[in-house]
């Protein structure tokens, strides 16, 4: 059965395709309706990334129509997919991963938490999403790289930045400029080399869940 996954900067297209599904560009409003009107309507849809500034964001109604009127199984994770899954879990959309749980629990609520700018051709990310920064800073505390106070300061500074300006280097540089009095070289090294990528990890978990369900259904 046909399966389509909308993804962009959060996970590379070749990684999506390796699960035996079609990799589509970040979803925009109307994309799912066009799929439902096609001759080869998918039985499964995965939503990772979508547009924020470049076009209209996908609406919950489009997803509900695909599920209710056409029986499509819809999964969401990482970015717009996590946001919509948190809103539509009670209607049957399946949410996967840390970002989904953060939205569903109310830990985060803003669109800018997952927003990213990206190259229009390659879809490569041009900034670091706030949710990745939050998860990476939590990991830095767990691994003893910095204390909770420093991590909280870094998160606050990152949140204050306009989302296209967010990067690990920019956050650490801003902390130094404001005079925290700490040696932040270890934090920067961790963030730029060893930190977890929450959005990509969630996307991979969603793809595994989709693949498992597809295989089980024959």
Image: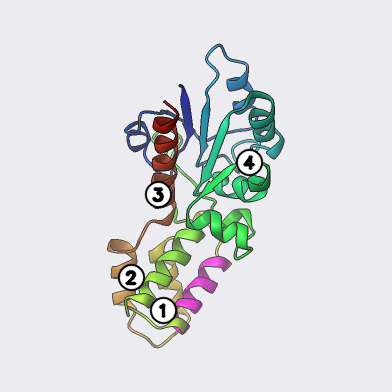
Residue 218 versus residue 9 in the image, above or below: above
Nearer to me, 2 or 139: 2
For residue 92, the mark is: 4
Magenta region: which residues?
149-159
Q: Residue furthest bottom?
A: 181
Nearer to me, 66 or 13: 66
- Is residue 186 in the magenta section? no
- Could you tell me if the residues under marks 2 and 1 are in contact, i.e. CB atoms within 8 Å? no
Q: What secondary structure is marked by label 3?
A: helix
Closer to the camera: disc 2 or disc 1? Answer: 2
Pick whichever of labels 3 and 2 is earlier in the sequence: 2
Nearer to me, 60 or 161: 60
For residue 176, the mark is: 1
The quadrant in which residue 8 appears is: top left
The quadrant in which residue 29 appears is: top right
Closer to the camera: disc 3 or disc 1? Answer: 3
- Is residue 155 in the magenta section? yes
Pick whichever of labels 2 and 4 is earlier in the sequence: 4
- Left or right: 108 in relation to 144: right
Q: Which residue is mark 2?
A: 188
Q: CA distance from mark 3 to mark 2?
A: 20 Å
For residue 200, the mark is: 3
Pick whichever of labels 4 and 3 is earlier in the sequence: 4
């Amino acid at each position: 059965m046909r399966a389509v996954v909308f993804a962009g900067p959060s996970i590379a297209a070749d990684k999506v395709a390796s699960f035996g599904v079609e990799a589509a560009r970040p979803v925009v409003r109307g994309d799912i309706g066009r799929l439902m009107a096609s001759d080869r309507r998918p039985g499964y849809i995965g939503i990772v990334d979508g547009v924020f500034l470049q076009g209209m964001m996908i609406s919950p109604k489009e997803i509900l129509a695909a599920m209710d009127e056409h029986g499509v199984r819809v999964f969401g994770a990482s970015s717009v997919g996590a946001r919509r899954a948190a809103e539509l879990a009670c209607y049957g959309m399946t949410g996967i991963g840390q970002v989904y749980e953060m939205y569903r629990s109310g830990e985060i609520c803003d669109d800018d938490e997952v927003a990213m700018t990206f190259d229009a051709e390659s879809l490569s990310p041009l900034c670091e999403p706030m949710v990745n920064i939050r998860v990476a800073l939590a990991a830095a505390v767990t691994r003893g790289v910095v204390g909770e106070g420093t991590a909280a300061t870094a998160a606050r500074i990152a949140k204050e930045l306009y989302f296209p300006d967010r990067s690990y280097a920019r956050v650490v540089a801003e902390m130094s400029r404001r005079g925290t009095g700490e040696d932040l070289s270890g934090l920067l090294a961790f963030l730029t080399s060893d930190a977890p990528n929450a959005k990509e990890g969630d996307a991979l978990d969603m793809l595994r869940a989709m693949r498992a369900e597809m295989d089980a259904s024959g």
